[in-house]
Image (tube, rainbow, N blue to C red):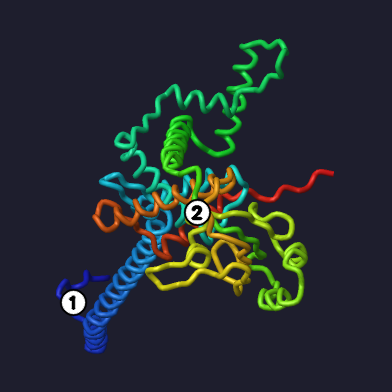
Amino acid sequence: MAFPRNPSDAGQIPPSESRRRARGRRARQEENPRAKARSGKEYTHQRLAWAIGTALILVLAGILLAGYYQKFYHPPRVWAGEVRDVEFTMGDLVDRIRVLQGLSGSVDLSVVPFEYLQELLNAEILRQAAPGLGITITDEDIDGALRSRFYPQVPEGQETDPGQLDREFDNNYEIYLARTGLSRKVHRETLEEQLQLRFLYAILGLGIEDTLEQVEVEWIRTELTSEIDVSAVRERLNSESFAAVADEVGMPAGFAGPGGYVGWIPMGAFPSMDGMLFGDEESGEEPLPVGEIANPIFLSEGVHIIHKLSGPETRELSDVMRTKLNNELLVEWKNNQLKRGASEGWLKMNFDSDLYAWVADQVAVSAPRNQPEER
């Protein structure tokens, strides 16, 4: 007969089992702190890695944003020049150069950016000075200039349809605007500047006398980039005819005719030659004697070897020299205004190598690609 187990026996564990269980508890107690320590270190390392990664991403994003700001957003908004609180930005400068690019197909980026900045400033100077000079350009003046340029020319005696001519005018004008990238508003402003410049040219021309003291010259001109040895050319003139050598190596630029003959030149028509041709009391420079041939002189217009034929003599001014003298007076007026504005503080320019590089890049991007020749 089986008897029920004594309840008190259930709590009794053999000594060996008790010792085994005790060792297990001690092992678990020792393991838990180590596991917790490992887990804490891994969590710390993980957080540190995330923090470093996030910081690197933020730094990279900052570099990219700074690069974008400096290359694309900031430069167009940087002021390029100012005339009495009227500012022009680098973006304005690029737009104007692109007009020239659209008309000519290419621009000389070695000189155009700075020259066009000066032209922007000169145009604003003239706009502000126009009322005092008696120059007023009306909308009718601008409309007339537009029609003279874009309105179809009808042969005399041919019947025309005014409506058709107006449509052709609009079409011609739209083609021009598309080619240059100008809006009608901006183009009218540009045309107003051109008309103001024409009026100023005419005003300055009124001061040119009909007769002026002049000297008679002929010259041999070559380009600054020419490979011609001008010293050797000058040496040849000691034994060869000036006209023959001029016809062989000379590169006329609208003033010298056959044999290098230029004619009678007044003072101021070629300012860089005035000292040589007429002398300069301030610097003590003596004029080139009549009959003498000067050594080559290097000017922005090219390299010149000048032969003074006669003069000085008071003579009637030729149409060619009147135009040249008028152009030089216009250039002088512009340069004097720039110098005056800079000295008095109402004109400022901002142009350095970095801004020049940005302007050149922007113009190069929009340069027309060479089209394949039609066959």
Q: Is residue 320 left or right of residue 274?
A: right
Q: Position of residue 310 (x, y in %)?
A: 60, 61
The residue positioned 39% from the left and 52% from the top of the image is 73
Label 1, label 2: how far apart the Cα atoms are: 144 Å
Q: Amino acid at mark 1?
A: Asp
Q: Position of residue 18 (x, y in %)?
A: 22, 85
* Residue 276 can be seen, yes or no: yes
Q: Is residue 327 left or right of residue 320?
A: left
The residue positioned 63% from the left and 63% from the top of the image is 309
Quickly name the residue at label 1.
9
> In the figure, 243 relative to 133: above or below?
below
The residue positioned 57% from the left and 47% from the top of the image is 101
> In the figure, 344 relative to 222: above or below?
above
User: Around disc 1, counting alpha carbons within 10 Å, would you say few (fewer than 14), some (14 to 19), or many (20 or more)?
Assistant: few
- Mark positioned earlier in the residue sequence (1 or 2): 1
Q: Which mark is residue 213?
A: 2
Q: Position of residue 29 (x, y in %)?
A: 21, 81
Residue nearest the observer in this picture, 299 or 234: 234
Residue nearest the observer in this picture, 281 or 133: 281
